[in-house]
Image (spheres, grey):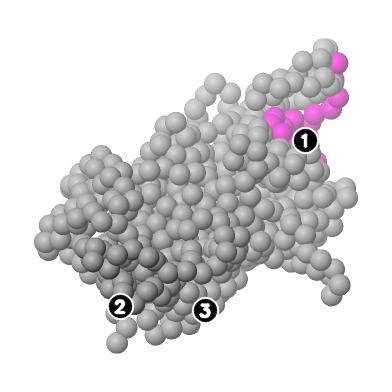
Amino acid sequence: MTETRPATGPPEERAAPFHYNARGQQCFTWTLTDCDITDPVQLRIGPDLILPVIFIPGVMGSNLKSVPRRDDEKTRSVWRLDYGFAGIPTPLLGQWVGQKAGIRQSLLHPDRVQVDDEGGVPNVPRGMVQDDQQLLPAQRKAALMRRYRERGWGEVGQTSYERYLMWLEHVLNSPTVPRHLNYTLELEDRHWEDPTAAYRRLKPGVDVFMPALNGMDRIDDETEGVKPLATDDLLAGVRFNMPVHAFGYNWLETNAESAEKLKLRIETIREQYGKRCQQVVLVTHSMGGLIARMCAKLPGMEAAICGIVHGVMPTNGAPVAYRRCKVGMRDESFGTSLVIGSNGQEVTAVFAQSPGALQLLPTTRYAPGWLKLLRENQSRTLSAMPALDQCPYDAIYLERYRWWGLVKEEWLAPKGGTAIEWKDYQHAIGNARDFHSALNTYFHPKTYVFYGSDTNFASFESIRWRIRPGLRPAGSTIPPVPIDSLFQTRNSDVHQGGRTPLYVRGHSGMSHPSVKYIDGSSASEKLPYSDWELHCEMQDGVGDGTVPTSSGRAPIDQAEHGQVQEQLKMRGFDHEGPFRNEQVQLITLQWILKIAAQARKPS
């Protein structure tokens, strides 16, 4: 069909619709009209060079599926964070709530799972993912979803990351906002909704402040902050389109293996875009930062990575990982514990066989003495480990016989599970030690870091076992274990039920109908007699609820040659949700643009 309007009307400029193919090339579509219609048609040509941004999620943020044991066996979802009721991952919750330690151990084994790329993805256009106008509506949606899957978005948790990835794709690659002509960073103006808007031309040498950062982009000598973005950065970065990719990984296997796979992904992406793409930018969440750092150490990768933005990275590990192996997660978050593990048995069943998870434990660079045994009503420490001359791997994680060792050996063989032996656990700890040693204090030369330090999200700077007198039988003549010897007490003399408290020389006592847990729940059971009770206390520091401030802020102290360009202390989010925070979104955008300004241009 052709248009039938008078050719004598005033000329009307029209823009040809376009989309991008998998190689990031613009493809224009236009339907030929009657030869009498001579209105000009614009082909709006964007940047030709490509600088991909790859997002790397945190632990448990990647979707996993089973590894088939036979050629004719189908895979099935094991861990998928898709939207469910009210935008939360209710399918995942329904899959894991109430599952015992044995089932968790059997399914969540690093050798029995692989990355699942069939997680939920958007079906709407954003940035460089645009509609192909030549397709029917249903085909357009399918094509959009296919492009997001090609970018790896289906590999990462939809509930945790999809909104951020869509926002980032839009602000970096909007088809209607020319980044090289206008970038006031007042994103709420929604200039992209009006393709006919007049855009001011940028002048070089001008600082560009982000109003929503509330002054965090005004650095001084006394507080942590970031330097403002300059118009020079925007003018330099305009050479590139910046498609947003995601990299899901098997978070149960060693992060060293995930780093190798990230290298292959980077090489594949560069090959996909061809000679127009020389480097990539990495944005990481939590444990994803450790993987990115290790990847950058691999041959050729430091040059292939233009820069890295790290968010809430456990640089030196986090003591909460130890606590969850001993008493579970129920005291921290009842809802989350239903999925991750309510008690020590459920957490240990997965944790002890997973090198990736074990690599979140405090490293030798974490402050010594973080595992404490304290007297009741006293701040004086009865004992603390590791000492200055000890490493936590031998002193704590591989301690086999004393009650405070990381793993209770009998929990390695839960009922209904596939038991692992102590030597297998030793091997996994060895992987953690080797990974931490190889990573050491390496950071990519262009590193940017933000971390959480918020009193509203208390974190475990240390693990404190508080000694309280136990319930003794009336008329008992047997003296209790001396309090000064409790740190040397063996597993056989301490009852560990996977919840706090632990009982020293504990045994069944009188019936008591209202035993209270820390979270307020109760259980009718025999109240145990014991010499002493060992209570694992709650958070003693600040951070983001998981990573304490001391570990989050470590990069700038450890970088020996100024690799950390900027580091920012932030508030207002927990460990799982920083990328839903507006200020986090804006600061990561600012850093990406600074990195892009320094990217290598293909020759």
**Residue found at x 80% / y 60%:** 421
First-in-chain label (2 vs 3): 3
- Which residue is label 1 attached to? 497
Q: How far apart are the alpha carbons under marks 1 and 2? A: 57 Å
* Residue farthest along the top direction in this orientation: 474
| Relative horizontal placement of residue 499, taking residue 559 as reference (left or right) | right
**Residue found at x 57% / y 35%:** 464
Q: Secondary structure at mark 2?
A: loop
Q: How far apart are the alpha carbons under marks 2 and 3? A: 18 Å
Mark 1 crowdedness (10 Å alpha carbons): few <14, some 14-19, many ≥20: some
- Amino acid type, label 1: Gly
- Which residue is label 2 attached to? 600
Figure quadrant of the C terminus: bottom left
Q: Nearer the viewer, residue 129 or 5?
A: 5
User: x, y percentage for residue 388?
Assistant: 48, 52
| Relative horizontal placement of residue 29, taking residue 79 as reference (left or right) | left
In this orientation, does residue 230 appear? Answer: no
The magenta segment: 487-511
- Amino acid type, label 2: Arg
Q: Is residue 504 magenta?
A: yes
Mark 3 crowdedness (10 Å alpha carbons): few <14, some 14-19, many ≥20: few
First-in-chain label (1 vs 2): 1
- Which residue is label 3 attached to? 268
| Relative horizontal placement of residue 368, taking residue 479 as reference (left or right) | left
Image position of 414 with respect to 152: above or below: above
**Residue found at x 64% / y 64%:** 117
- Amino acid type, label 3: Thr
* Residue farthest along the bottom direction in this orientation: 603
First-in-chain label (3 vs 1): 3
Q: Secondary structure at mark 3?
A: helix
In this orientation, does residue 82 appear? Answer: yes
